[in-house]
Amino acid sequence: MEHKVTKRISRELQRISPEKILRAKYLTSKNFLEGYAIIKGAPDSPYEGGFYIIKFSFPNPSDQSGKHYPFVPPICKYLTNCPHRQNPNLYENGKVCLSLINTWNTEDNRQEGGWKPSKNIEQVIISIQGNCFVSNALDCEPEYDYSIHFPKMTANYDKIVQYLNFKYNILDLYLNPPVPQQYVEEVRSYIREHINQNKTWYVKTLDFLSKTIKKTTLSCSKYSTTKTVNIDYPQLTRKLASVF
């Protein structure tokens, strides 16, 4: 049974779209039952320029209950050193809340948009990109459109997320990758290569933010971990420049 599962995962990875199209890189273990997707933040969003690591774990194929991949979805966990809530669908404890992988638990959702054996790893990555790394990030909350009903809160949250993106999903991620040791250099190499190829954008963006937002405190009352976030772009820019 394990052979069938690993063969299925291996086949999916062989067919996965090129990094330039998918905007993500997938690192896998030797037995394929664990992997790490490094997902780039989307352009024109507060996540732009950042890197987000999602751990994929596949249920044990030796389990006699029959609950193994692809009949159940991969278990996805967001890996970060950031103590703040960076997206409604990415929890501080690492939970990834998505209908596709059955972690947004409503019966209607499972029937209409939940996991099916025909789904695959690439579709999970694309779903995470489309449901997390977007502008007006609070609109990912299911209750209502925050950008319409609470425009100031939404704008503040995007500003907070953008700062956390540079601080934790570039600088801290590069210095302290939250992955097993065998993947550390691959993660750093991927980040370093992308930043070197897009250095002009990083310099211009950080220069603009250092001059406009500068040093301040921002608040978004939606989450307890974003009620008070200290922003210091000049200091952060200096630290990034010293590393890259």
Image (cartoon, rainbow, N blue to C red):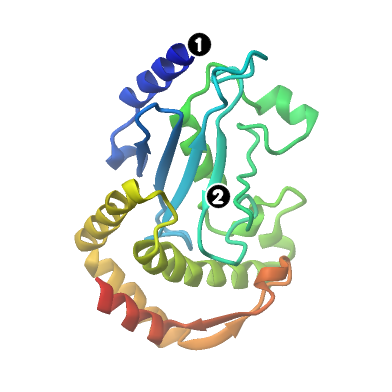
Residue 201, horizontal then vertical, whole percent: 28, 67
Q: What element carries label 1?
A: loop
**Front residue (pair 10, 161):** 10
Q: Which amino acid does label 1 sit on?
A: Met
Q: Which amino acid does label 2 sit on?
A: Cys
Specify which label sits upstream in the sequence, 2 or 1: 1
User: Which residue occupies 53% across, 29% down?
Assistant: 58
For the residues bearing labels 2 and 1, Cβ distance under 8 angstroms: no
User: Which residue occupies 52% across, 34% down?
Assistant: 57
With respect to residue 182, does 14 lie above or below? above
Q: In this view, does 105 lie to the left or right of 156?
A: right
User: Which residue occupies 29% across, 57% down?
Assistant: 188
Residue 27, horizontal then vertical, whole percent: 35, 39
Could you classify mark 2 by the number of other residues whose Cα lies within 10 Å: few (under 14), some (14-19), or many (20 or more)?
many
**Front residue (pair 217, 95):** 95
User: Which residue occupies 35% across, 66% down?
Assistant: 175
With respect to residue 65, does 32 lie above or below? below
Residue 34, horizontal then vertical, whole percent: 45, 34
The residue that disc 2 covers is: 132
Between the residue at mark 2 and the residue at mark 1, the CA separation in whole angstroms equals: 34 Å
**Front residue (pair 64, 137):** 64
Q: How many marks?
A: 2
With respect to residue 234, does 64 lie above or below? above
The residue that disc 1 covers is: 1
**Front residue (pair 113, 103):** 103
Q: Is residue 184 left or right of residue 110?
A: left
Q: Is residue 196 left or right of residue 84?
A: left
Residue 88, horizontal then vertical, whole percent: 65, 54
